[in-house]
Amino acid sequence: MNVRRILANASRREVLLSLLVVGVASSALGAVTWAHFSDSDASRSNALEAGTLDVTLDGANGQTASFSLTNARPADSTRHNFTLRNVGSTAGNHVEVTLSFSENDTRTEPSDPDLGTELDANATASHVRVTQLVYKDDSGTVIENPLSNVSDDNNNGIKDLDDVRNQAGTLDNLRAPKPNGASETYLVIGVRIANDDDAFTGTDEDIMADGVDVKITVTLNQDSSQ
């Protein structure tokens, strides 16, 4: 009986021990985690570089004194053909031309009060008739005639520099020359000092000793919204 009890107790210990081992093994199994594979690659040398949009006038940047009239009299005239190029790498959408004036009086007004009328830059520009204003392609063909769209805003009987300046839209959306200097376009401007023996209804003596510097700015725009 004692032997049976000992065997029974021994058997119980074995069972408990077996359960304990199984329990520990189960806990250990529940703690196991698995790693996941991954791989990556890269796209290299992705370069971003801005192109250039560079318009030149008569082969240069910052062209000055393209045309002039000095010591001029009524009916004296001059004309200039501006050559436009896009020497940049990016195509332009259109060309826009604007005019601005600054006074440049280098002479003393006459002492006669009937002749000594002082004109500012804008008034002097209104005494300079625009005789030609066309835009040509590289074959020399006229593709735009902006002067035909200019009106006599100041009612002096002529289309003058002041009229052109004030109606800037007439010199917008002109054809752009091709990039990399592949083509040229030409802006032709002709002017004449107003003469009251002609259509000019003002007094041509008023311009005596008055001068004006005319700045012609050519802008090459990349987008139609500009």
Image (cartoon, grey):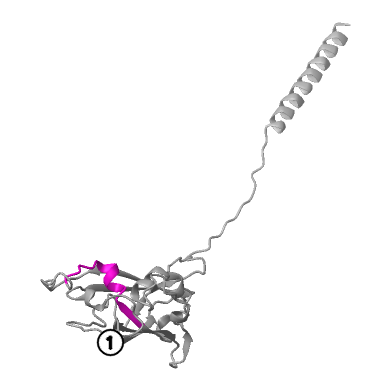
Residue 118 is drawn in which quadrant? bottom left
Left or right: where 159 falls relative to 68 = right
Residue 117 is drawn in which quadrant? bottom left
Q: Which amino acid, by three-letter code, is at mark 1?
A: Ser
Please state the extent of the stretch shown in magenta in the rendering.
116-130
Front-most of residues 135 and 130: 130
Quadrant of the image containing the N terminus: top right
Q: What's the residue at 36%, 82% (across, down)? A: 199
Q: Is residue 171 above or below residue 6?
A: below
Front-most of residues 129 and 175: 129
Q: Is residue 206 magenta?
A: no
Could you tell me residue 128's position as x and y percent?
A: 30, 78
Left or right: where 175 falls relative to 14 = left
Residue identifier under label 1? 77
Front-most of residues 206 and 76: 206
Q: Is residue 9 above or below residue 150?
A: above
Q: Would you say residue 98 is visible in this rendering?
A: no
Left or right: where 183 falls relative to 13 = left
Residue 66 is drawn in which quadrant? bottom left
Could you tell me residue 120's position as x and y percent?
A: 24, 66
Q: Looking at the image, which residue sits at the far top?
A: 2
Q: Is residue 119 magenta?
A: yes
Could you tell me residue 99's position as x and y percent?
A: 34, 71
Q: What's the residue at 79%, 19% (across, down)? A: 14
Q: What's the residue at 49%, 86% (across, down)? A: 143
Provide the secondary structure element on which disc 1 rests: strand
Q: What's the residue at 22%, 83% (across, down)? A: 69
Front-most of residues 161 and 9: 161
